[in-house]
Image: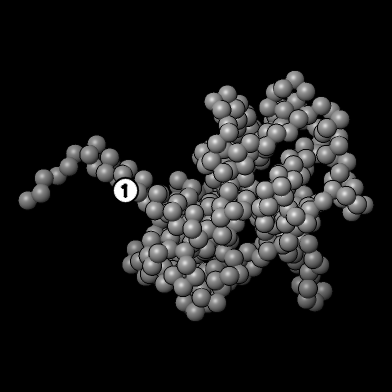
């Protein structure tokens, strides 16, 4: 008979297994994580499932496994891994939903009997095509010049370049920013409450006041030669247009480094906000009323307006679910995963 291990030994083994899974997932993302959401599957509060050389990340909420974006791996491996995960989830009594999936694998998902609905768009900018020259970007250019006139300095640093004092300053900004909020948002496209990553190739934009104090930080995660915006932190008294100036400087750095694309963020229902609702008068009216109510809570219009300043390509994102009757429950669990609803809310 095998002797039972004590709790500390078991905890240490579980920690080793978790570390191994993270290293394995990181290796797959480094090779196949071309999608802008891929690096965010490495968030510590997600569980990994491996198979066929691919990996997916998920979190179980109320008997629903919320999968973060698309599985990452060779194209042929994605449906095989997902099929195996669905079988595993059903054995556990879980439902399965993929949140913020791209259009790339939709045919494979549909081949597994899953359904998909467009739930928003992601703003992706080509740094080589971006410019502050011309009348269409006049207001954006004015924002950048306003920040400069007020004596603010913006510096770009790679993760490998940051010293101990800079890390301490960023931690202070993060703590001050969190103290003003009751909850952290983000799941599929954000590292959430787990702080700054320490990847060497990540890009950090630091904004300092005329007195040299750090007032704002933007963190872009590097993946497969691309960049995805993770966090935007701003505290204290800062000039209007500072976030715009930080993004413009980041795009300038990306252009100099010949980075092909920079993902700014995902905007829920952006396709409905940006374009007039289609359909008959009743449907259009219902859509406008729904958007007005949702915008009060989720600030959709504000996010779309900010992103539009940089002339991005808007790429669709999808909610992938099992059946129509389970769609309301899937939406509830996704909103809980993202932090918009409490985990105590029932579905």
For the point 54% across and 68% down, the residue is: 320
For the point 34% across and 63% down, the residue is: 92
Above or below 90: residue 229:
above
Q: Position of 112 compared to 253: left or right?
A: left
Q: Does residue 226 appear in this view?
A: yes
Q: Colour mode?
A: one colour
Q: Position of 255 compared to 18: left or right?
A: right
Q: Is mark 1 on a helix, strand or loop?
A: helix
Q: Position of 263 compared to 248: left or right?
A: left
Which residue position holds label 1? 17
How packed mark 1 is, by other alpha carbons closer than 10 Å (few <14, some 14-19, many 20 or more), is few
Q: Which of 252 and 232 is in front in this view?
A: 252
Q: Where is residue 267 in the image (x, y as percent from the top left)?
A: 68, 56
Q: Which picture quadrant has residue 115?
A: bottom right
Q: Nearer the viewer, residue 50 or 129?
A: 129
Q: Going by the picture, which residue comes out furthest to the top?
A: 211
Q: Nearer the viewer, residue 41 or 330?
A: 41
Q: Where is residue 147 in the image (x, y as percent from the top left)?
A: 82, 33
Q: How many marks?
A: 1
For the point 54% across and 25% down, the residue is: 164
Q: Position of residue 233 (x, y in %)?
A: 66, 37
Q: Going by the picture, which residue comes out furthest to the right?
A: 135
Q: Nearer the viewer, residue 324 or 40?
A: 40
Q: Does residue 66 appear in this view?
A: no
Q: Where is residue 340 in the image (x, y as percent from the top left)?
A: 59, 49
For the point 61% across and 53% down, the residue is: 226
Above or below 299: residue 171:
above
């Amino acid at each position: 008979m095998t002797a039972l291990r004590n709790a500390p030994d078991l905890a240490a083994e579980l920690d080793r297994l978790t570390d191994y899974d993270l290293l394995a997932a990181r290796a797959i993302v480094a090779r196949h994580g071309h999608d802008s959401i891929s690096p965010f599957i490495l968030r510590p509060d997600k569980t990994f499932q491996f198979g066929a050389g691919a990996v997916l990340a998920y979190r179980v909420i109320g008997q629903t496994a919320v999968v973060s974006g698309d599985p990452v791996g060779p194209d042929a491996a994605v449906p095989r891994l997902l099929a195996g995960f669905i079988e595993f989830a059903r054995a556990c009594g879980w439902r399965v939903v993929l949140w913020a999936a791209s259009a790339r694998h939709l045919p494979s998902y549909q081949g597994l009997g899953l359904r998909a609905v467009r739930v928003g768009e992601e703003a992706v900018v080509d740094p080589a095509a971006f410019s502050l020259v011309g009348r269409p970007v006049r207001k954006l250019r004015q924002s950048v010049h306003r920040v400069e006139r007020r004596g603010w300095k913006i510096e770009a640093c790679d993760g490998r370049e940051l010293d101990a004092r800079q890390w301490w300053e960023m931690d202070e900004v993060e703590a001050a920013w969190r103290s003003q909020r009751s909850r952290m948002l983000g799941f599929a496209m954000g590292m959430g409450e787990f702080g700054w990553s320490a990847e060497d190739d990540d890009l950090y934009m630091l904004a300092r006041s005329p007195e040299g104090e750090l007032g704002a930080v933007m963190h872009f995660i590097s993946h497969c030669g691309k960049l995805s915006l993770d966090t935007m932190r701003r505290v204290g008294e800062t000039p209007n247009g500072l976030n715009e100036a930080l993004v413009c400087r980041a795009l300038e750095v990306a252009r100099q480094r010949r980075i092909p694309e920079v993902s700014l963020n995902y905007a829920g229902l952006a396709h409905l906000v940006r374009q007039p609702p289609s359909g008959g008068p009743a449907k259009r009216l219902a859509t406008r009323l729904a958007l007005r109510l949702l915008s009060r809570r989720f600030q959709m219009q504000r996010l779309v307006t900010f992103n539009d300043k940089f002339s991005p390509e808007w790429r669709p994102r999808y909610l992938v679910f099992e059946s129509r009757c389970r769609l309301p429950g899937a939406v509830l669990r996704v909103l809980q995963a993202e932090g918009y609803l409490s985990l105590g809310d029932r579905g």
